[in-house]
Amino acid sequence: MAYRAYGLHDFRRIPQMGLLTDEEKFVIEVVGNVLPFKVNNYVLDELVDWNNFEDDPMYRLTFPQKGMLSQEHFSQIASLIKQGKTKREMKPLIDQIRLDLNPHPAGQKEQNVPEINGIELPGVQHKYNETMLFFPRKGQTCHAYCTFCFRWPQFVGMDDLKFAMNETHLVIEYIKAHPELTDLIFTGGDPMIMSTEVFASYLNELLEADIPHLQNIRIGSKSLTFWPYKYTTDPGAKELLGLFEKVNKSGKHLSFMAHFNHPVELSTPVVQEAINNIRATGTQIRTQAPVMKGINDDGDLWAEMWKKQVQLGCIPYYMFIARDTGARDYFAVPLAECYEIFRAAYNQVSGIARTVRGPSMSAAPGKVQVLGTQEMFGEKVFVLNFLQGRNPDWVNRPFFAKYDADALWLDELKPAFDQEEFFFEEPTLKGATSSTSIHHHLN
Ligand SMILES: *Cc1c(COP(=O)(O)O)cnc(C)c1O
Ligand code: SF4
């Protein structure tokens, strides 16, 4: 299958666009001027249900929707387009709107950037002791874009790829200097946008460095949803699978962290063949996704998805909660509801699928799971738990927040039982950085 991508400049050439009214196409143009938009022929032909595209989860996953901008932002852009303004004339307004959309929730760009021998590694994040994220320079785009992606600023050119790097030798030096690191995660964008040749050069250098404490190599990717041909008929597919096999044979564990939002993404013959091919290399596929309104905010859907994943030999891993950036208002599901969705799904799968953890917020102090709601001492509370902590000592110490049916994120929660602060905010606690609280730091 030949890959054919469409974006803002040529989406009107998408064959299925004939099904849309002029107004619907105008919406794509308006919103697509602010938020990234890319779709491809596989998504269009195999995943979107064009008989019902207005309500279709895959359509919402990839096509800009009116509610993704505020009414004010929408009409500002719409009027400039109607006046026939050029890209350059529209740019100041577009830039302003993008800044209003909280492009970096949490200073996640500035924080967690490590150094080796006084040199900063801007393409690396080392937040949790055992695990390092690596953003290879050539892996900073995707086969299509998710409309909810929290990495949207890098796709619209706001980040100048400052985040990314290609200097593998520095990464290797860094890992060698950090014996606590067991896991390296290739992330992006989507690292599986890289050609086999480029990806092989990264991996070969890593394997040749022969670092015994580096045990697990992970690849975070949505390519099984957006372009499964990467592992079947694409040029370089065989070599890529060979490379996966080589990593596993070297004694490292290769884990493919696949992003699946909806069961339909697991339904095509080609994705199933791709999963089989990857697994045949000894690679383990683990799955993760955020809960998004209008896409997958339904417990039965998650149960179906986890069951299907297990049937295909994948291990359900994380359910996430949407971060506060980009089109988050459009997709937001309150914490309390995320928990109900998780519970409704978890209740109807066997222990084999209960490897999944969540719902979880990747917040400033760590990955915080909503374990449940409870009534204690006459107060309704959330029971929360660190799955990962900036300070490892915080992990697996359940704590309590006042119940709030509308809260969308950790920074909106208050400690229960009239406590002043959450335990991890106390400046005296070993490992806490300063008296800054999560109310000031979002990530
Ligand atoms: C989620 C995450 C990881 C990986 O955590 P695991 O629990 O080991 O899967 C690593 N770094 C960052 C910054 C993360 O958000
Ligand atoms: S594939 Fe991943 S990185 Fe790319 S747009 Fe989707 S969520 Fe973002």
Image: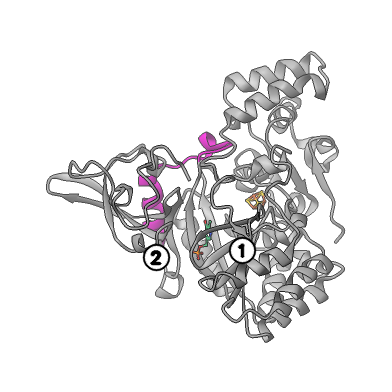
In the image, residue 13 lies at what x, y percent? 86, 38
User: Where 382 sits versus 385, above or below?
Assistant: above
Query: Gap in Å between the C-alphas at discs 2 and 1?
Result: 22 Å
From this viewpoint, which residue is outermost toward the top? Answer: 83
Side of 289 where 37 appears, left or right:
right
- Is 68 a magenta residue? no
Q: Is 176 in front, or is 184?
A: 176
In the image, residue 245 lies at what x, y percent? 72, 81
- Residue on which disc 1 sits: 258
User: Where 435 sits versus 115, above or below?
Assistant: above
Residue type pointed to by label 1: Ala
Residue 237 appears in which quarter of the rendering? bottom right
- Residue on which disc 2 sits: 348
Side of 434 where 112 appears, left or right:
right
Q: Is 89 in front, or is 270?
A: 89
Under tag 1, what secondary structure? Answer: strand
Under tag 2, what secondary structure? Answer: loop
